Image (cartoon, rainbow, N blue to C red):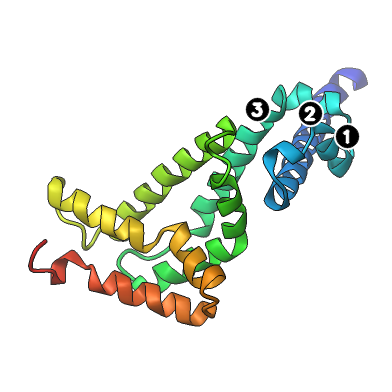
């Protein structure tokens, strides 16, 4: 009787331990790939960082590419949570976007730079673009035209005005303060509002 009663507990504890190990590996891989080129990070580096064996990583993710895809999925899910903003509130939209870029923008730029030779980076970048476009449709739903060419044009403008590389230009290349960079993006988004454009 006791053995049967304790079995679900043991199974639950084992599942929790497996999930904790998986999360630790993901965090270790994300931390290393945030700072270093994809090819410079081996499974052994990640295993050492996470305190597990290389075989454990292989068992969970199948290898480095599978782990990279899992890291990209983790980052994507964190991005969805981080970018919650009221529809049409430009100041709030820019604020949450900058908070996200300040947190992981440099890592994003590093991954995009590798997309031509690292398939996992290319997949992550493509997913991030699609995710960003869907986010734009959500937070600017009040200003976007009905489906059609005008909507696509407006989305393209908004995508350019909020792109990661624009953040990089302002914050890293030109050295703008976060306050000045956010103000620049707010002004840009205000200037391309389709409701105020006669040629929209």
The residue to which callout 2 is attached is: 57
**Helix, strand or loop status at disc 3:** helix
The residue to which callout 1 is attached is: 52
Residue located at (42% from left, 69% from top): 94
Q: Tag on residue 66?
A: 3
In percent of width and height, residue 102 lies at: 58, 66
**Helix, strand or loop status at disc 1:** loop
Distance CA(mark 1)–CA(mark 3): 17 Å
**Helix, strand or loop status at disc 2:** helix
In percent of width and height, residue 60 lies at: 74, 26
* Quadrant of residue 61 within the rendered picture: top right
Residue located at (44% from left, 64% from top): 166
Q: Do the residues labelled 1 and 3 touch (CB within 8 Å)?
A: no
Label located before the other in sequence (1 or 3): 1
Distance CA(mark 1)–CA(mark 2): 8 Å
Q: Nearer the viewer, mark 1 or mark 3?
A: 3
């Amino acid at each position: 009787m006791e053995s049967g009663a304790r079995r679900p507990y043991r199974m639950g504890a084992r599942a929790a331990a497996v999930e904790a190990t998986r999360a630790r590996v993901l965090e270790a891989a994300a931390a290393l790939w945030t700072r270093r080129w994809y090819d410079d990070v081996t499974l052994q580096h990640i295993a050492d960082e996470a305190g597990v064996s290389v075989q454990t990583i292989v068992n969970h993710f199948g290898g480095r590419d599978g782990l990279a895809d899992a890291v990209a999925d983790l980052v994507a899910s964190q991005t969805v949570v981080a970018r919650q903003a009221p529809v049409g509130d430009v100041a709030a939209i820019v604020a949450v976007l900058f908070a996200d870029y300040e947190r992981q923008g440099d890592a994003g730029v590093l991954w995009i730079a590798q997309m031509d030779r690292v398939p996992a980076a290319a997949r992550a970048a493509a997913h991030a673009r699609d995710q960003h476009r869907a986010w734009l449709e959500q937070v600017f739903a009040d200003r976007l035209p009905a489906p059609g060419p005008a909507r696509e044009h407006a989305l393209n403008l908004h995508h350019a005005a909020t792109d990661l590389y624009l953040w990089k230009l302002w914050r890293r290349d030109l050295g703008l303060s976060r306050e000045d960079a956010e103000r620049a993006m707010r002004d840009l988004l205000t200037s391309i509002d389709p409701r105020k454009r006669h040629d929209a």
